[in-house]
Image (cartoon, helix red, strand yellow):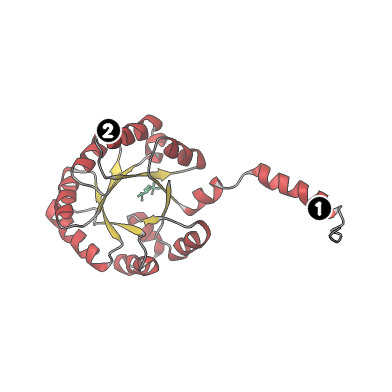
Amino acid sequence: MQYFLDSAHVHEIEYALKMWGLDGITTNPRHIQASGKPFLQVTGEIGQVVAGTALTVSVEVNPHHTDYEKMVAEGEKLAAISPNFVVKLPATEAGFKAVSVLRGMNIRSNLTLVFSAAQALHAMRMGAFFVSPFIGWKETNGEEVRAFVQEVTQIRDLYDFETQIIVAAVRNGRQIVDAALAGADIVTAGLAVYKESIEHPYTDLGLKRFQGFWDETPYGTPA
Ligand code: E4P
């Protein structure tokens, strides 16, 4: 089970690489905007952080593109910037077509904004390298998400598709566990979500108790 960081903050990426052995990075227009830097500048900086590694960086094309030719042209441009870049495309008819054209050029893609198993299936059959079912948005909308992820992994395994499944828009540790139990390959989440997922109030409470006992015990010398 791989952990990707959903962020365009270089300091967050460096922190997660150092502390958690991060497996990859996903970005989107919201994260790029939050970085406060121009699109090509910040994606280039992230590319430099992972240069020489196998870590992928998913970089989304202009969301205003409605025809696949424009998506492909921008995807080609992005892929030329860094071999680590995976082109992120929307789960629209044009996006699916762009996946297959880019695949023919040996350029990897990540289908984003996937909200149904049918969309995920089409992404797989068109040759997506990654498919990103969004669970946080669905759950907020009152939809179930466990069966959704299970269906996507089941389809992938039944037909031996090579596509890796990134469970995206993950909001808490429970969703990380659910994604793992459903057989997803990867989760992508923000820094705070991972941090909270590896903390527990009882761990802190227990540590405080043990510190009390420790302080009341002489250290001594070996017998
Ligand atoms: C995943 O690849 C997306 O960037 C991300 O999870 C989008 O959802 P969010 O911005 O609502 O978390």
> x and y percent of residue 110 in the render?
27, 50
- The residue at the point 16 percent across, 56 percent down is 72
Residue hosting label 1: 214
Horizontal side of 148 relative to 209 (left or right) equals: left
* Ligand 1 closer than 8 Å to label 1 CB: no
The reply to whether residue 116 is visible in this rendering is: no
The quarter of the displayed image where residue 93 is located: top left
Q: Nearer the viewer, residue 208 or 65?
A: 208
Q: Nearer the viewer, residue 182 or 189?
A: 182
Of badges 1 and 2, nearer the viewer stands 2
Q: Could you tell me which secondary element the residue under label 1 belongs to? A: helix
Q: The disc labelled 1 sits on which kind of residue?
A: Trp
> x and y percent of residue 195 in the render?
54, 51
The reply to whether residue 73 is visible in this rendering is: yes
Q: How many numbered callouts? A: 2
Horizontal side of 165 relative to 190 (left or right) equals: left
Q: The disc labelled 2 sits on which kind of residue?
A: Leu
- The residue at the point 36 percent across, 32 percent down is 150
The quarter of the displayed image where residue 33 is located: bottom left
> x and y percent of residue 16 in the render?
48, 59
Horizontal side of 93 relative to 36 (left or right) equals: left
Residue hosting label 2: 158
Q: Are discs 1 and 2 less than 8 Å apart at CB?
A: no
Which dot marks residue 76?
none
> x and y percent of residue 59 in the render?
30, 58
Mark earlier in primary sequence (1, 2): 2
- Above or below, comparing residue 79 to residue 192 in the picture: below
- The residue at the point 19 percent across, 57 percent down is 106
- The residue at the point 86 percent across, 58 percent down is 223
Q: Could you tell me which secondary element the residue under label 2 belongs to? A: helix
Q: Nearer the viewer, residue 163 or 94?
A: 163
